[in-house]
Amino acid sequence: MDGSHHHWLEERGPKLVLMGYIDDATGCVYGKFYDYEGTQPAFDSLKGYVKKNGIPRSIYLDKHSTYKINKAQRYKEWPFRDEEELTQFARGCRQLGIELIYAHSPQAKGRIERLFETFQDRLVKELRLERVKTLKEANQLLRFYLPGFNKKFSVAAHQPGNLHRQVLGVDLNEILSIQREHVLRNDRTFVHEKQWYQVLDRTRAGKIMVHEYLNGRMAVKYGKNRLSYKPIEGPIKRKVVRKVKPRRSFVPPKGSYWRDGFKLAGSLKN
């Protein structure tokens, strides 16, 4: 699996990303165009692949920030922490039972790279002949183009069988959603993406999980239970204005040289 950033529409439209999958046993290809390479496109493309072929045993991909957290960790070996820190995509694949294998260089994933080189030649020409200008039109052409490509270039596997698992009892919409945990305050309010929300159901939950689905909807869950909610206006943060006390000029006490001495010096001058 990989994403190919390319001017697929040349000068006729925006720059797109082709999220491509190639089966290691047969060479069958699945792909879809997106505006960018990120969590939502990765989830959506994986959902389409799983619906068509089943759940793969493993996925070989690069270390893009969508698939792997690359920032420096306090401890290099994750067993010393409570749990391994995962991206949203890696968490979804773990829940589906998909092993992620990360390539250490572009040359290591040469098979998908060679596929993209072929597409950047042949597919670009097909898009040009059909005068495709938009993302929607590009995906429509791709749905007709890939079956013919697979029929011509795919091969039979060396061994019989299929390691893809069937999608039975698996809710892809729930698993392939962006999930974020939030603390639920005593007044049953929480903040998500700088927006305040009020939970309408009575609950003693200390933490809740917010699910952002691929269709743009959002759900609030405590365990398996969905909670009703509504957006509200958060508390107004009043700017604290500190009162600055006026500086009082220093007045020397009576009998002080700094008070009487200057008067005496002034009289001597006169």
Image (tube, rainbow, N blue to C red):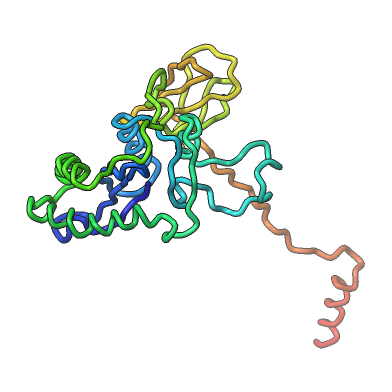
Q: Nearer the viewer, residue 145 or 152?
A: 152
Q: Is residue 146 left or right of residue 230?
A: left
Residue 11: x percent and y percent?
15, 61
- Residue in the image at 32% along x and 39% along y: 45
Left or right: residue 253 compared with residue 23: right
How far from the left and from the top, in percent, is residue 269?
A: 82, 88
Nearer-the-camera pick, 2 or 7 = 2
Q: Is residue 176 visible?
A: yes
Splitting the image into 4 quarters, where does residue 10 fall?
bottom left
Q: Nearer the viewer, residue 77 or 268?
A: 77
Residue 29's place in the image compared with 220, above or below, is below
Instruction: Identify the residue shown where x is 40% and y is 27%.
Output: 165
User: Can I make out residue 234 in this image?
Assistant: no
Residue 262 image position (x, y, % from top left):
84, 77
In x, y percent, where is residue 201? Answer: 49, 13
Q: Quadrant of residue 52?
A: top left
Can you tell which quarter of the image residue 253 is in?
Answer: bottom right
| Nearer to us in this view, 58 or 159 | 159
Q: Outermost residue, right direction?
A: 255
| 127 shown above or below 224 | below
